[in-house]
Amino acid sequence: MPIIDDKSFKWLMLSAPYVREDYNDSFFVEYLDELKDKGDAEKVAEYIGKIYLKMLERVTPDFDQAHIRSTLEFLYNAGAAVIANRICNTYGGEQQHFLRDIYVKYNESGKA
């Protein structure tokens, strides 16, 4: 069962900027989504959030939206609202608004 720890975090951070080169961004997003339930939620959220932001420096994947939305919900619920907001704002800046309802849910309700 894969988990995310300091070692795998470092490898994933190195890989994140290059996921689009082989069109593996949807696999990478799915993999991050699967890692969210493996370990301490706050630590895992920090790892996943940082990896996701690193990936967004070069590519803004939009498939599969269900995995992206699931990951964002996890980040908000695990206390990583600052990172989750940055991710949502990056998508919004690219005119991709499929995360808007999640952003509004956590920012207008005072949860973020």
Image (tube, rainbow, N blue to C red):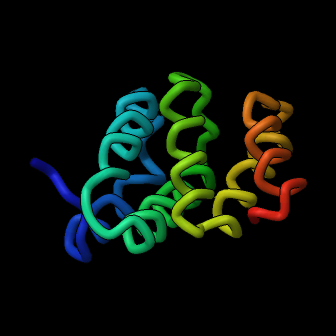
The answer to whether 109 appears left or right of 1 in the picture is: right
Q: Is residue 8 above or below residue 16?
A: below
Quick one: 112 or 60, which is closer to the camera?
112
Residue 76 location (% of width, % of height): 62, 57
Residue at 51 percent of width and 66 percent of height: 50
The answer to whether 36 appears left or right of 77 in the picture is: left
Residue at 32 percent of width and 59 percent of height: 12
Q: Is residue 47 above or below residue 55?
A: below
Toward which corner of the image does residue 21 lie, by quadrant?
A: top left
Q: Is residue 73 above or below residue 23?
A: below
Quick one: 96 or 59, which is closer to the camera?
96
The answer to whether 29 appears left or right of 93 in the picture is: left
Toward which corner of the image does residue 39 lie, by quadrant?
A: bottom left
Quick one: 56 or 21, which is closer to the camera?
56
User: What residue occupies the far right of the structure in this picture?
Assistant: 108
Which of the image's four quarters has the C terminus?
bottom right
